[in-house]
Image (cartoon, rainbow, N blue to C red):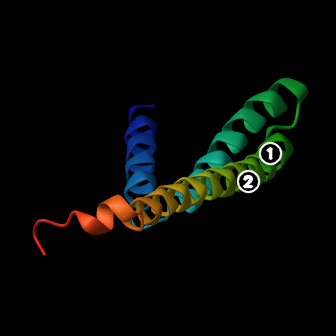
Amino acid sequence: MHKFYIFLILVIGISLSGCANMSQTQQRTVTGGLGGAGVGAAIGAIAGNAGMGAAIGAAAGTVGGFLFGKHKEAEQNAYQRGRMDEYYRYQNTPRQREYQPYH
């Protein structure tokens, strides 16, 4: 049993270090898939088929993680567009064009 825990810690460590070069959406997709597989396996074990539960949970978690990642990505893009719009609006005001002490 002790070897199993060492193996589990190694798998988790390698999995987490593999996410270093991923985008936020990719990380959320993987996290959703792994979490869904775990929850699906637990529910499947109670129902009598852990493998099928893990497969269904992984699929549902992956889709959910991807959709959540895309939503957060769109939210961040909208925020950045709003900030840039405000920046350009401020730069083009007459008062700002008159007062440029360093130019």
Residue 46, image x, y percentages:
83, 24
Q: Amino acid at mark 1?
A: Gly
Residue 30, image x, y percentages:
60, 55
Q: Secondary structure at mark 2?
A: helix
**In the rendered image, the vertical position of residue 50 relative to residue 70, given as above or below:** above
Residue shown at 86% from the left, 45% from the top: 52
Residue shown at 45% from the left, 50% from the top: 11
Residue 100, image x, y percentages:
19, 67
Query: In the drawing, does residue 57 fall left or right of residue 98?
Result: right
In this view, the residue in front, 77 or 64, is 77
Which mark, by number, is residue 67?
Answer: 2
Q: Amino acid at mark 2?
A: Leu
Q: Quadrant of the C terminus?
A: bottom left
Rounded to the nearest whole Å, what is the CA distance between mark 1 and mark 2? 24 Å
Query: In the drawing, does residue 25 fall left or right of residue 49?
Result: left
Q: Secondary structure at mark 1?
A: helix
**In the rendered image, the vertical position of residue 66 relative to residue 7, given as above or below:** below
Which mark, by number, is residue 40?
Answer: none
Q: Quadrant of the N terminus?
A: top left
Quarter of the image holding residue 70? bottom right
In this view, the residue in front, 84 or 55, is 84
Query: In the drawing, does residue 58 fall left or right of residue 77?
Result: right
Q: Farthest top residue?
A: 46
Residue 36, image x, y percentages:
71, 42
> Circle 1 sits on which residue?
51
